[in-house]
Image: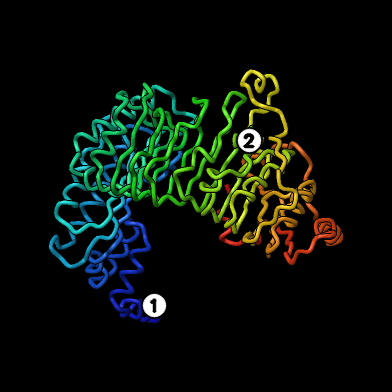
Amino acid sequence: MQKRSREDRLSALPGDILVSILDRLDVRDAARTCILSRRWSGLSAELSRLVISAKDFVPEGVSTANISGGDDLVRTNAAVVEATKSMLARRDPGGRHTVRLLSTEFYLSDDVPISIGHAIGNAMATHKIEKAEFTVLTLKERKQCRLEDRVNYGAWFVSFFYACLDVFTGLTRLSLEYLMFSKSNFLSKILATCKQLKYLGFLSCGTKSMITHQVEHAQLSELSMVKCHFGKVELKWVPRLTRTDFAFWRSFEEIPLSFGHVPLLEVVSLENAALSWHKMIKLSTLLCETSVRDLMLGFRCEKIWVQPESLTKRLASAFNRLRIVNLGHIREGYDLTWTMFILEAAPSLEEFYMTVIDHPCEMQMDKDKRREGLYIEEKGVEWESPTSNFKHHRLTKLIIFCFESYMASHVRRVMNAAVNLKYVYLYRRLSCEKCKHMKPLKPIMFPRSKKHRCSMRKLMTQCIESGARIHFLDFSVMSDDHKARLP
């Protein structure tokens, strides 16, 4: 009796609250919930978010990591189609309830999931849909995916693309992975067809031959290219672009990226595990046409590929609006003095993050192979400030992940320059699941005891007039905004 009473109280809630509850479930759980009663069944037609993921329909007893081709894949994609049709069949095509988001995630296969495209296309033609998203998955991940596999995946996607052009013209978000396209201009074809795209993401995608792609798109606001081989990408005219992520350009001496008309671009993330032959990048040249506010530079525990620069009009223009800088995966033992050039060139900088760590699980550890692979062994880059008494007036936060005692001199250097610094957060070395069974390259030198931390504070603040509060922290107490900045 009490159980029925609780159920009745739940069903008695206002409809908009019940819809809000259902919107937080994946489609499979939402569908199951809607069969509980006639009241719940009627609510399925009012859902504003339909997120349909193939991973939620993998056959019982099969993990997403071990799903194979053949029957497992056919059944999984068929379930995605049925879920899409079922949820949309309950809605009135001319009704007042708009689908705010229709997101579909599915696996590519050799028979190409055309039925998924047709189901989404019919939904887009008959229902009010604000945002439509595709995430295209492949069975093999990076370490298992050979060039031959990527070529096959690319061919399957091209077939799917041309069979469902009406769907792609209305997409607002598209994520692709492990595709190699035979035609070098296919990237341009995607951009020309998908005119409503707000987000476009590529992971380990590319074309057999590399050309220069001049990107022009009126709606695109986010572009992500990670471990891709498209040739040079020129963002020639992307007036609504606000964020770009560009990572790993091992096949190029220089970063194959340039910025043209991107007046709204605020967030830029660049990352590369550079070898000795990679050329140093001058940020004053790369970012001179932008107004970036949030800059992330990642080094993947290898060569520092950024060229420290003395302050010039061009550098000042590129860094004038910078508010946040995040330097990721600087190799342990590297001199950090060079990072001061960023502080000197960015007068409006408010938050400065850096992570200093070696990841044995990602690094090439064999000395002979490092020599053969042209990995560099020198201790970072050298730089000496031309201004001995430089002062910064806007920086309020310095955050160092994986702090070690030898970095105290750098913290002191920043504290001396940043006269209005309020907080210094120094986190101990983070735990990597892949590295935890491997011996650290260097012993951990984080001040653990209260006595050690007290002496460290005195060392950092000696003869310096600073009101900054220094915190030595474990990752277990890290705030959400700091977690979001972990590389």
Left or right: where 68 falls relative to 300? left
The answer to whether residue 257 is visible is yes
Q: Nearer the viewer, residue 180 or 234?
A: 234
Residue at figure coordinates x 51%, y 33% from the top left:
248
Residue at disc 1, secondary structure: helix
Residue 48 coordinates in the image, percent (x, y): 28, 63
Type of the residue with mark 2:
Ile
Residue beneath label 2, please?
A: 304
Give the answer, above or below, for where 348 lies relative to 66: below
- Residue, x 70% and y 61% (percent of image)? 419
Q: Quadrant of residue 16?
A: bottom left
Q: Is 17 situated above or below 288?
A: below
Please give left or right for residue 191 compared with residue 241 in the image.
left
Q: Secondary structure at mark 2?
A: loop
The amino acid type of the residue labelled 1 equals: Lys
Circle 2 residues within 10 Å: few <14, some 14–19, many ≥20: many
Q: Is residue 338 above or below residue 389?
A: above
Do residues under tags 1 and 2 come within 8 Å of each other at their CB atoms? no
Q: Is residue 176 left or right of residue 170?
A: right
Q: Residue at x 73, y 62 (%)?
A: 471
Which dot marks residue 3? 1
Percent from the top left, x then y, of residue 192? 25, 38
Where is residue 177 drawn, in percent x and y?
Answer: 39, 36
Quadrant including the N terminus: bottom left
Q: Is 455 in front, or is 12? A: 455
Name of the residue lying farthest toward the front: 313
Upstream in the sequence, badge 1 or badge 2?
Answer: 1
Color style of the picture: rainbow
